[in-house]
Amino acid sequence: GENVEQHPSTLSVQEGDSAVIKCTYSDSASNYFPWYKQELGKRPQLIIDIRSNVGEKKDQRIAVTLNKTAKHFSLHITETQPEDSAVYFCAASSGTGNQFYFGTGTSLTVIP
Amino acid sequence: DTAVSQTPKYLVTQMGNDKSIKCEQNLGHDTMYWYKQDSKKFLKIMFSYNNKELIINETVPNRFSPKSPDKAHLNLHINSLELGDSAVYFCASGFSYEQYFGPGTRLTVT
């Protein structure tokens, strides 16, 4: 089955700096890679996703890059703000049977 | 914002009891899921139902049983609750590649 690894487990940045979270996956059949943000006590919410036919996707201050050859994808947050503080999860799915495999999460703290 | 709803939000019970968590989605999605999030925040898939048929069962104890009366509902029944069952349980629904989570049910077993 798929195995998704996520690093780092914790990340602290100064407000205004950039944050990068990296994930690797093992199953070459995976073709959809969403990122979820989970604020304290709340549900995980989809913030951005990328499919395997695209190398990069950007939405305002967040972007995701995908390297299919190396089987890794990354979340980039620029100009971080205190409200970006949360746990971020990456995931991988092949679409078949709609199975999602989640990384272990990254706790991001943005220091004002 | 109530696309995927769960009840109850909090559940406190004693070891050995049987309890149920209900989930409903009004998005018209074909697939619904149950996830367990432990104290370390790990999200583990427990079950997935596609149009009322179980398509994933990630080797959870058979004390856990999903029940789907129709495509919009996926309930989770837990028998003989144990201390280790304490966690937050998230229901989710999905269509094609996308997945949306419910607000979660915090289960505490004492």
Image (cartoon, coloured by chain):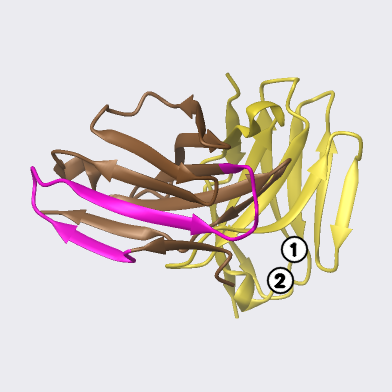
Chain colours: A yellow, B brown
Residue A22, horizontal then vertical, whole percent? 68, 42
Mark 2–mark 1 CB contact (< 8 Å)? yes
Q: Which amino acid is tagged 1?
A: Ser
Outermost bottom residue: A112
Front in this rendered view, residue B70 or A75:
B70
**Is B63 displayed left or right of B59 in the figure?**
left
Front in this rendered view, residue B49 or A25:
B49
Residue B95, horizontal then vertical, whole percent? 69, 45
Q: Earlier in the sequence, mark 2 or mark 1?
A: 1
**Is B98 displayed left or right of B57 in the figure?**
right
First to last magenta residue range: B8-31
**Rendered position, B71 above or below B88:** above
Q: Choose top left, top right, bottom left or bottom right for residue A96.
A: top right
Chain where mark 1 sits: A
Identify the residue under disc 2. Answer: A80
Residue A49, horizontal then vertical, whole percent? 76, 49
Helix, strand or loop under label 2: loop
Residue A59, horizontal then vertical, whole percent? 85, 63
**Is A18 displayed left or right of B63 in the figure?**
right
Q: Which amino acid is tagged 2?
A: Thr
Identify the residue under disc 1. Answer: A18
Q: Residue at x 53, y 52 (%)?
A: B72
Q: Residue at x 32, y 53 (%)?
A: B21
Gap in angstroms between the C-alphas marked 2 and 1 = 6 Å
**Rendered position, A84 above or below B6:** below
